[in-house]
Image (spheres, helix red, strand yellow):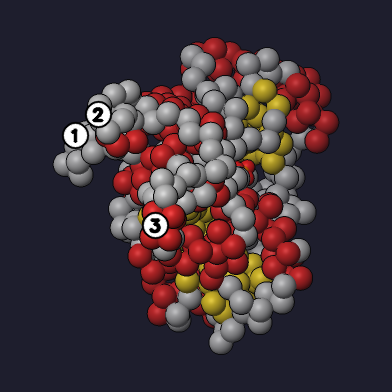
Amino acid sequence: MAEHDSKNHGTGTRLVGIGRRAEWTGTAEHPGAVVNPPVYRASTHLYPDMAALRDHPANEDGKFYYGRRGAPTQWALAEALTALEPGAEGTVLYPSGVAAIMGALLTVLRPGDVLMMIDNAYEPSRAMGRGLLRDFGIETRWFDPADVEGFAAAICDRTKAVLLEVPGSLTIEVCDVPTLSAIAKARGLTVVLDNTWASPLGFPALARGADIAIMSLTKHVGGHSDAMMGSASAGPEWYRKLRIRAQGLGNVVSPDDAALMLRGLRTMGLRLAQETASALALAEWLEARPEVAKVLCPMLPGSPGHALWTRDFSGGCGLFSFVLKGGTSAARDALIDGLSLFGIGYSWGGFESLATPVDPAPIRTASPWPLPGLDAGDRFGVRLSIGLEDTADLIADLERGLAAWSAMA
Ligand SMILES: *Cc1c(COP(=O)(O)O)cnc(C)c1O
């Protein structure tokens, strides 16, 4: 085990060392010979003799068996992610964030069960409730992220789990995870939490009350917009069940992608710190602009969710939204088309900045849009994922986009 991986060390030191077991980065004669675990491209795992084949350990972590259970490249990534999540016993890797969410839900739910889902969940998570889960006899009910009492009142005998996401997609609203989790646990529910936004660097999901912490590694961990993966970390009880269900679903991640994720992980702390600082500067700048009705960035003092964010989070990221004052959809198109440093695309968390329109009205079913405090006409939003470009250049770019908006609005 690398010396860096000590709970006494700071996050940067730990990000350098986690997952780099000497037996995974070298040979028997020269343990730890290279810095990173090699890319083990392996479907077949070989046994020295029949006795070894018959004696192979029954489904243990970190033992060669067959390609679908991974090899040191994937094991190193899973071990590193477990080390980052306080309270985790292990981490299961999935081919995407969506696969991780579905893999967790199919572990905790059975036909006839009811799932409570937060209303600002990632749209493909909502689609699971309307689609595959429903087809399998599982009912999903959505609840307002701001309404703790409404959540408690909606729990029934058949409710078995809750899917939280914090902050939620598009509107970046922060829900009260410790309170919602306490209510859920008192009623015997399992708490599944999508922690893609902050990652365990900014929000220790299990310590705040979640039973299963999910991340789309595609975003911050990969960080370079070139690979997709998801993860679910949990304590002993749920980790084993997640692992068995993931095996049953045939989930496996490629060693090449696992190596890319490990590479991204080493610099994630630096990237998140830089993106957070830049996002905060841009959020402050946008807040002062006459074209902007509201900035939806919980890191910004005075913004919705700031009090909860200050209480529960130790870090943020570069993803936030803002709502324009009045205007039209076409004017917002002009704004986004008027940007030259922001790509137009659905992902986020990469080194390059992105902008997308935000239109929660047709998506949300349990809570209002525009959010309380906004006028009915203030409904055209823009989501920004801030990358590693210089903040001053991004501000100048947004200034051009807002000029294009004003020319049309
Ligand atoms: C992108 C995203 C996912 C899904 O991740 P993929 O790797 O794209 O499948 C899940 N949750 C949130 C909050 C996301 O933004």
Q: Mark 3 and mark 2: span between their CA atoms?
A: 24 Å
Measuring 83% from the left and 31% from the top, which residue is drawn there? 330
Single out the mark in the foreground, 2 or 1.
2
Single out the mark in the foreground, 3 or 1.
3
Q: Which amino acid, by three-letter code, is at mark 1?
A: Glu
Residue 335 in the figure: left or right of residue 260: right
Position above or below: 376 against 273:
below
Q: Can you tell which quarter of the image residue 110 is in?
A: bottom right
Q: Which amino acid, by three-letter code, is at mark 3?
A: Ala
Q: Residue furthest left?
A: 8
Q: Residue 3 has which mark?
A: 1
Upstream in sequence: badge 3 or badge 2: 2
From the Cβ of disc 1, is ligand 1 less than 8 Å away? no
Upstream in sequence: badge 2 or badge 1: 1
Measuring 34% from the left and 58% from the top, which residue is drawn there? 89
From the Cβ of disc 2, is ligand 1 less than 8 Å away? no
Measuring 64% from the left and 39% from the top, which residue is drawn there? 323
Q: What secondary structure is found at the residue carrying circle 1?
A: loop
**Pointers 3 and 1 in contact (C-beta within 8 Å):** no
Q: What secondary structure is found at the residue carrying circle 3?
A: helix
Single out the mark in the foreground, 3 or 2.
3
**Pointers 2 and 1 in contact (C-beta within 8 Å):** no
Position above or below: 141 against 30:
below
Q: Can you tell which quarter of the image residue 346 is in?
A: top right
Q: Residue 51 has which mark?
A: 3
Residue that mark 2 sits on = 29
Q: Mark 3 and mark 1: span between their CA atoms?
A: 36 Å
Q: Residue 84 has which mark?
A: none
**Quarter of the figure that contains the N terminus:** top left
Q: Splitting the image into four quadrants, where does ligand 1 fall? A: top right
Whole-percent x, y for residue 157 in the image = 56, 87
Of the pair 357 and 344, the residue shown nearer to us: 344
